[in-house]
Amino acid sequence: EDQVTQSPEALRLQEGESSSLNCSYTVSGLRGLFWYRQDPGKGPEFLFTLYSAGEEKEKERLKATLTKKESFLHITAPKPEDSATYLCAVQGTSGTYKYIFGTGTRLKVLA
Amino acid sequence: EAGVTQFPSHSVIEKGQTVTLRCDPISGHDNLYWYRRVMGKEIKFLLHFVKESKQDESGMPNNRFLAERTGGTYSTLKVQPAELEDSGVYFCASSQNNGDTQYFGPGTRLTVL
């Protein structure tokens, strides 16, 4: 069964303190792995798509990487406005285009 | 370009009542998806439309849920009759082609009392 596990569940960082969020997945054929950011009361906001092991994507203070079993979202020198829940989702190649989501990592960056 | 919109943003109903949620996808997106998150759980897939056809409805929990997308534009998700366990946030997403990145709406928070 396709599954996504994110860790940690919650993370508190001081402003400027870099860290990484983990997304481990099992899927019968990976079509894509997706990172989203979600603010309270809003829908998931797209950040990155990764398709194959070794791929990396960057946007401002965020960098996403992918291996055959997991993805990391690295946050460099975070700011308070980076506080949000970060969601990871995978899409398999089994004939359906649905996303399988993890439960997310709640990130709080303190000034 | 307007994003995915959903209406209403919140709905509070009594058990046994009917509620209809609406989703307007990004213009030109043939693919429309419904997901929901119940309290403390991850976002879970409900179904996928390609234009007006149901491509995958494997996530629909039971026959109290009915989704339609007449004309291949907006979609509605009706819950009839609503039960307590239907409470949660219902998200709609759209993509241009199968397998493309899905863009999500703000969600409808449904509370069944």
Image: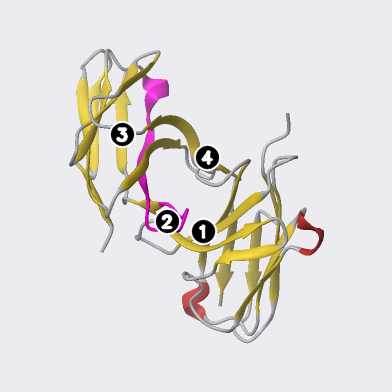
Question: Disc number at residue B100?
Answer: 4
Amino acid carrying label 3: it is Leu
Please tell me how crowded label 2 is: few (under 14), some (14-19), or many (20+) other residues with Cα within 10 Å. many
Task: Please report contact status of discs 4 and 3: CB closer than 8 Å, yes or no.
Answer: no
Amino acid carrying label 4: it is Asp
Q: Position of residue B67 (x, y in %)?
A: 66, 70
Mark 4 or 1, nearer chain start: 1
Amino acid carrying label 2: it is Ile
Mark 4 or 2, nearer chain start: 2
Badge 4: chain ID: B
Q: Secondary structure at mark 4?
A: loop
On the rendered image, what quadrant is the N terminus of chain B found in? Answer: top right
Task: Please report contact status of discs 2 and 1: CB closer than 8 Å, yes or no.
Answer: yes
Residue A30 vs residue B83: left or right? Answer: left
The residue range painted magenta reads: A80-99
Question: Disc number at residue B43?
Answer: 2
Position of residue B56 relative to residue A51, above or below, is below
Residue ID at (51%, 59%): B35
Question: Disc number at residue B71?
Answer: none
Which residue is identified by label 3? A107
Q: Is residue A89 magenta?
A: yes
Please tell me how crowded label 1 is: few (under 14), some (14-19), or many (20+) other residues with Cα within 10 Å. many
Q: Is residue B98 magenta?
A: no
